[in-house]
Image (cartoon, rainbow, N blue to C red):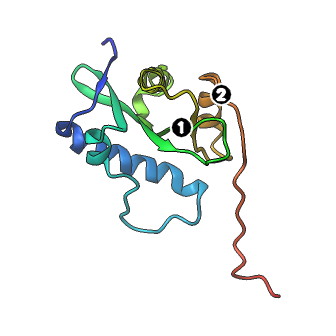
């Protein structure tokens, strides 16, 4: 029952596509702008096969129980760094939460970024998602900038 971290393969797609839907279900309460019905966030196959991204999974007893990706992205021209490592697709099956599996994924992703010469790491998390915020802060992330929104549909001007 020891967790094993490894790079994802295309054979993992069925499990990873279920994880993606789990993320969408978990995020809908935090974001009223997400469309209803079946949607996708990621091109998981592309993330697995692209040289500038990597997907890691955690396995326990041959069962994939957690995931996450890192993608190298060009950053804004005025920043000190040229590229950033962007983390996403962070998911842990409900019955395995609280076992520090997300930290195993983050560690693998950060190590991958560092080997690629990427030292600026970013991710997005909903401000109301307190458990995720705490997990990322525990991993060393700090709040940096807040993205704000306003729906003006019902405002009179």
**Viewer-side residue, 82 vs 115:** 82
Question: What x and y, as percent, mark residue 93?
Answer: 39, 34
- Residue 6 picture location, percent across and down: 29, 23
Say left or right for 137 vs 65. right
For the C terminus, the image quarter is bottom right
Mark number displayed over residue 127: none
- The local crowd at label 2, few if under 14, some if 14 to 19, many if 20 or more residues have their Cα within 10 Å, is few
Q: Residue furthest bottom?
A: 157
Q: Pointer 1: what residue?
A: 84
Of the numbered discs 2 and 1, the one sitting upstream in the chain is: 1
Question: From the viewer's perspective, is 64 left or right of 148?
Answer: left
- State whether residue 77 is above or below residue 107: below
Specify few, some or many for label 1: CA neighbours under 10 Å numbering under 14, 14-19, or 20 or more.
many
Task: Tell me the residue at 21%/23% (across/down).
Answer: 62
* Residue 156 image point, x, y percent: 81, 87
Is residue 109 positioned above or below 19 on the image? above
Dot 1: element: strand
Q: Is residue 89 visible?
A: no
Q: Residue furthest top?
A: 2
Q: Mark 2 — residue? A: 137
Q: Residue at x 65, y 30 (%)?
A: 134
- 62 vs 17, left or right, is left
| Element under disc 2 | helix
Spatial distance from mark 2 to mark 1, Cα to Cα? 19 Å
Residue 3 found in image quarter: top left
Q: Could you say where residue 66 lies in the image, as x and y percent from the top left? A: 37, 31
> Viewed as shown, does residue 12 lie left or right of 129?
left
């Amino acid at each position: 029952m020891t967790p094993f971290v490894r790079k994802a393969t295309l054979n993992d797609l069925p499990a990873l596509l279920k994880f993606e839907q789990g993320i969408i279900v978990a995020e809908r309460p935090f974001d009223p702008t997400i469309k209803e019905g079946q949607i996708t966030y990621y091109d998981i196959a592309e993330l697995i096969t692209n040289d500038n991204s990597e997907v890691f999974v955690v396995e326990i007893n041959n069962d994939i129980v957690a995931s996450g990706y890192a993608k190298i992205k060009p950053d804004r021209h005025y920043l000190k760094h040229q590229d950033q490592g962007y983390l996403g697709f962070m998911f842990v099956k409900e019955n395995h939460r609280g076992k520090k599996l997300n930290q195993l994924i983050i560690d693998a992703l950060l190590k991958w970024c560092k080997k690629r010469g990427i030292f600026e790491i970013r991710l997005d998390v909903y401000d109301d998602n307190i458990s995720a915020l705490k997990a990322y802060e525990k991993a060393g992330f700090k709040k940096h900038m807040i993205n704000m929104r306003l729906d003006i549909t019902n405002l009179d001007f």
